[in-house]
Every structure is written in structure tokens, then in C-alpha cells.
Image (spheres, helix red, strand yellow):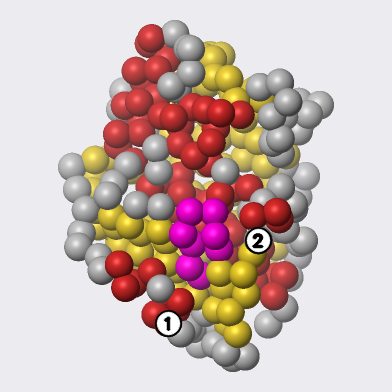
């Protein structure tokens, strides 16, 4: 299987899982923003943060090559993440280990492990709408972006807050602007837009199928759609997820990838 194509597919699931499992937006809110904005975003982070988790997901990719379904299992513990493909059969066993900003791929057919250096974090993934920056940079939004409340009202009949993140001077970032929309009732995300330096929407991430898991409400379906590719999208469905479960540190080692 083409390694670049594999990168584009797995980037989607890692991005989606990072959104569910990290407190990146809360860290962004720790800037000098208005108190109501900070409190609302921190509430959102409380819903998504967890010491550990185990998830089973299914990812559907629809692009110019047609449709493809991939099933995988994900383990997380702090800043560690392990992803292992379970189907289809020709890709089963492929694994990704992420510790901090260090990302390594294991390809069982060639018995090869590939390290992705941090220097590639700002690069686009060929054939993909995702960048490595999505994976390793989310927790640094507070350092690189300023956050403001840009809208409060109804979107699609739902009361929401909308936050706009803009790069701070001299910040080395990919996006010219990020817009985050969350429901006022329970502080769960409904939509996220990524814009270029000219303010043009590049891609959008939609959250839906909200469920209560471990006492928290989370979106169990995420759909990423590029703005300039009508009909193309990637859907991530969480079939099962458990928070704050015991996970051995040995899970996040290269020998365990193989």
C-alpha cells in the first residue's frame, strides 16, 4: 500500500481522537480572554479530557478513488497514543505510536518502522486534507493563537457560542484562522472551521451523534470535509469508548507495535 496514501487516511482518525481526548481548547482559553469565554471553553475541556481511554472506531473515506472503510482500536494514556488497524485484512496489524510530538508507523508487511520527524509538522500530507500539525500542535494553541468570542446566538436552531482563534504575531502556524462552535447548553462542539491567511475556508469538521459516556456528553461522529472537494469527506464513528481505564505503559512501546 502506498505509504503517502496511508498517511492521509490515518491522519483523520488521529485528529478526531485528539479533539475528543485533549484539553487543547481549554489551554487556548488560558490567554487574557473575557471571563465568560474562558469559563465556557474550560467547561468543554472538562468534558473531553481524560487520564486514559480505549476506543474502537470505524473510519469511512469517500474520495476520488471511491469509498473505503477502516476499523481500528485506539489506546491513550496522557500524551501517549497507540492506534492499531483491525480491518480490512490487507491492512490489519498496521500500527501508529505517538508519544508527545514523536510519531512512528509500523508496517507489518515490510516489518518496517518509520519515524516522522517534528520538522515535518508544518508540512501538508500529500493527497490529504490533514497535516502533521493537526496531531502534534493542538496543545499549543494558547501559545500561538489569541481567542475571542465572535458569535453568540442561534446556528441551525441551536444556541451556540462561536470562538475565533487568530495567530499571534510571529507564530509559525498553518491556519490563518480557526473557528470553533460549541453548544451553549452543554459546551460540546458542533463545528470547527479552518481558514487560510486570506480568510477562505479550507476544511470543516462537523460533530454529531452526541452520547453520554462515562458521565460526559461527547460527539461520537466526526465528519471532515474539504471546502473545495464537493462530495468528498471522511467520517469517524466511535463504536465504543471507555475513559479512565487501566492501561499498561508497555502498551506504548515499539515492540508492542509489532
Residue indicated by mark 1: 255
* Relative image position of residue 34 (x, y in whole percent): 44, 8
Most frequent secondary structure within the magenta stretch:
strand
Please indicate, yes or no, whether residue 160 appears anywhere in the rendered image: no
- Above or below for 78 versus 240: above
Q: Is residue 40 visible?
A: yes
Q: Position of residue 180 (x, y in %)?
A: 53, 29
Q: Which mark is residue 117?
A: 2
Q: Residues within 10 Å of mark 2 (few under 14, many from 20)?
A: few
Q: Is residue 8 left or right of residue 103?
A: right
Against 158, is 239 above or below?
Answer: below
The spot of residue 162 in percent (x, y) is: 51, 21
Q: Is residue 202 above or below residue 121?
A: above
Mark nearer the N terminus (1 vs 2): 2
Provide the secondary structure element on which disc 2 rests. loop
Image quadrant where residue 119 sits = bottom right
Magenta range is: 96-103
The quarter of the displayed image where residue 189 is located: top left
What is the x, y in percent for residue 67? 63, 69
Asked if labels 2 and 1 touch by Cβ distance under 8 angstroms, the answer is no
Q: Residues within 10 Å of mark 1 (few under 14, many from 20)?
A: few
Quadrant showing the N terminus: bottom right
Q: For residue 109, which quarter of the picture?
A: bottom right
Whether the magenta-drawn stretch holds residue 102 is answered as: yes
- Residue at (30, 67) in percent of width and height: 249
User: Could you tell me which residue is drawn at 69 percent across and 29 percent down?
Assistant: 171
Residue 172 shown in magenta = no
Residue name at image x 72 percent, y 70 percent:
4
Disc 1 to disc 2, how far (Cα)?
Answer: 20 Å
Amino acid at each position: 500500500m502506498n505509504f503517502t496514501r496511508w498517511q492521509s487516511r490515518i491522519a483523520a482518525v488521529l485528529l478526531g481522537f485528539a479533539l475528543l481526548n485533549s484539553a487543547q481548547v481549554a489551554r487556548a482559553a488560558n490567554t487574557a480572554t473575557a471571563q465568560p469565554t474562558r469559563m465556557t471553553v474550560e467547561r468543554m475541556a472538562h468534558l473531553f479530557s481524560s487520564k486514559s481511554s480505549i476506543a474502537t472506531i470505524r473510519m469511512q473515506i469517500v474520495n476520488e478513488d471511491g469509498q473505503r472503510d477502516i476499523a481500528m482500536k485506539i489506546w491513550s494514556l496522557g500524551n501517549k497514543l497507540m492506534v492499531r488497524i483491525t480491518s480490512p485484512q490487507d491492512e490489519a496489524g498496521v500500527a501508529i505510536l505517538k508519544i508527545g510530538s514523536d510519531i512512528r508507523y509500523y508496517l507489518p508487511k515490510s516489518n518496517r518502522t518509520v519515524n516522522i520527524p517534528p520538522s515535518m509538522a508544518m508540512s501538508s500530507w500529500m493527497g490529504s486534507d490533514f497535516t502533521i500539525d493537526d496531531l502534534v500542535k493542538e496543545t499549543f494553541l494558547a501559545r500561538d493563537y489569541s481567542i475571542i468570542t465572535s458569535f453568540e446566538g442561534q446556528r441551525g436552531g441551536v444556541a451556540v457560542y462561536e470562538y475565533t482563534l487568530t495567530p499571534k504575531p510571529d507564530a509559525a502556524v498553518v491556519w490563518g484562522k480557526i473557528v470553533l462552535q460549541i453548544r451553549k447548553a452543554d459546551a460540546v462542539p458542533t463545528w470547527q472551521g479552518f481558514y487560510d491567511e486570506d480568510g477562505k475556508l479550507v476544511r470543516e469538521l462537523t460533530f454529531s451523534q452526541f452520547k453520554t459516556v462515562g458521565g460526559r456528553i461527547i460527539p461520537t461522529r466526526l465528519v471532515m470535509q474539504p471546502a473545495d472537494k464537493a462530495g468528498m469527506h471522511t467520517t469517524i464513528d466511535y463504536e465504543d469508548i471507555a475513559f479512565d481505564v487501566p492501561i499498561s505503559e508497555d502498551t506504548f512501546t515499539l515492540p508492542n507495535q509489532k
